[in-house]
Image (cartoon, rainbow, N blue to C red):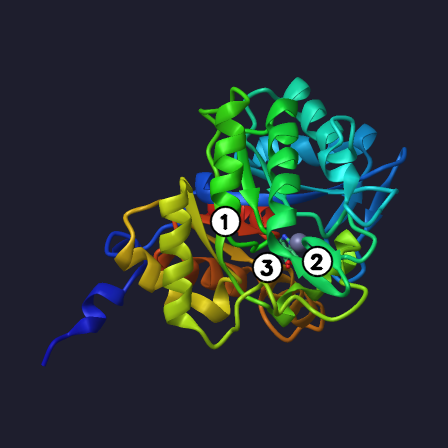
Amino acid sequence: MKRFRRLRSAENIRRIVRETHIDKSSLIYPVFVEEGENIKKPVDSMPGVFRYSVDRLGEILAEIRSANIGGLLIFGIPKHKDELGSCAYDDNGITQQAVRYIKSEYPEMLVIADVCLCEYTSHGHCGVVHNGRIINDETLPLLAKMSVSLANAGADIIAPSDMMDGRVAAIRKALDENGFGDTPVMAYSAKFASGYYSPFRDAAESAPSFGDRRTYQMDCANGREAMLEIEEDIAEGADIVMVKPALAYLDLVRAARDRFDMPLAAYNVSGEYSMVKAAAQNGWIDEKRIVMENLTAIKRAGADIIITYHALEAARWIDEEK
Ligand code: PBG
Ligand code: ZN
């Protein structure tokens, strides 16, 4: 009989045979910034997450800095929303202002800019709307313009999350033509139409005012199609690809890892975070254990980069273990 328990007998043995470790450098923390002054507003559906105005962004940046995680993913919430999401590609838009501020205070901090129109459009869809339909090819130039504007503000990585076809190619071309040939694109490649995004839409005020996102985000039943989406984004020039959400899609994180020799990100989304927080607040689970187990599972499935609202707390727990 094989004595598996020999290597489990004490922590000093367990730790030398442990197969998966989470590096703090692989964690990315999402940050919400809104227009206005002196704002640090809790997001009701995401305990521990806040929306900041630029003048108070320094508070969370200091935490990110001292946690020494990989970087942040910035989401802007403008005051003015219109049909075409014009604040998204305004060089003085809220997101551009925030990126400029971050890079001036912390030049070495990695700033990933989410590129999508839904926080900026009056209808809350991720693209241009005509007669209740989301028009793919009319959206592409706007996403390209937004990407150039954010790169120009200082964003280190451009991360399109809209799920329009052909957007990686359009963005890559626009970045190259505007002197940002060295700015990488992290594509939300296999992004599913998921119920797990609702706390985020509450945080970012980006819920669609009619219909849903099923005509552009993927059907949660489709794993093979996810591989085609990733393959296409690589062909169009993506430098990093992503599976989103993470936990309910770990089979696809693993499949993508086995299939593509590309840096792979997984997005541990808002609903995944809020469910853990709610159960922890009720005393039903041990939050630290559950969070570390979830993050380890995402890493074990093959993700190199984990975008997570748990990043700051996880960084502390990783330090404690050392
Ligand atoms: C914008 C965007 C969304 C998320 C990231 N970028 C929302 C959506 O697609 O509706 C979701 C993130 C999360 O739930 O944490 N398109
Ligand atoms: Zn969107």
Q: Earlier in the sequence, mark 1 or mark 2?
A: 1
Q: Is mark 2 within 8 Å of ligand 1?
A: yes
- Ligand 2 quadrant? bottom right
Could you tell me the amino acid type at mark 2? Phe
In this rendering, the label closer to the viewer, 1 or 2: 1
Quarter that holds the N terminus: bottom left
Left or right for 202, reference 246: right
Which residue carries the number 2 mark?
A: 200
Q: Earlier in the sequence, mark 3 or mark 2?
A: 2
- Specify the quadrant of the image occupied by residue 302: bottom left
Q: Is mark 3 within 8 Å of ligand 1?
A: yes
- Mark number displayed over residue 269: 3
Mark 1 neighbour density, 10 Å: few (under 14) some (14–19) many (20 or more): some
Q: CA distance from mark 3 to mark 1?
A: 24 Å
- Mark number displayed over residue 177: none
Q: Earlier in the sequence, mark 3 or mark 1?
A: 1
Instruction: Tell me whether the residue at label 3 lies in contact with that at label 2, contact meaning CB atoms closer than 8 angstroms.
Output: yes
- Residue at 59 percent across and 72 percent down: it is 285
In this rendering, the label closer to the viewer, 3 or 1: 1
Which residue carries the number 1 mark?
A: 166
- Residue 87 appears in view: yes
Left or right for 92, reference 312: right
Mark 2 neighbour density, 10 Å: few (under 14) some (14–19) many (20 or more): some
Could you tell me the amino acid type at mark 3? Val
- Residue 319 appears in view: no
Residue 191: % across, % down: 52, 60
Residue 241: % across, % down: 42, 49
Q: In the rendered view, tell whether residue 159 sits above or below residue 231.
A: above
- Residue at 60 percent across and 35 percent down: it is 147
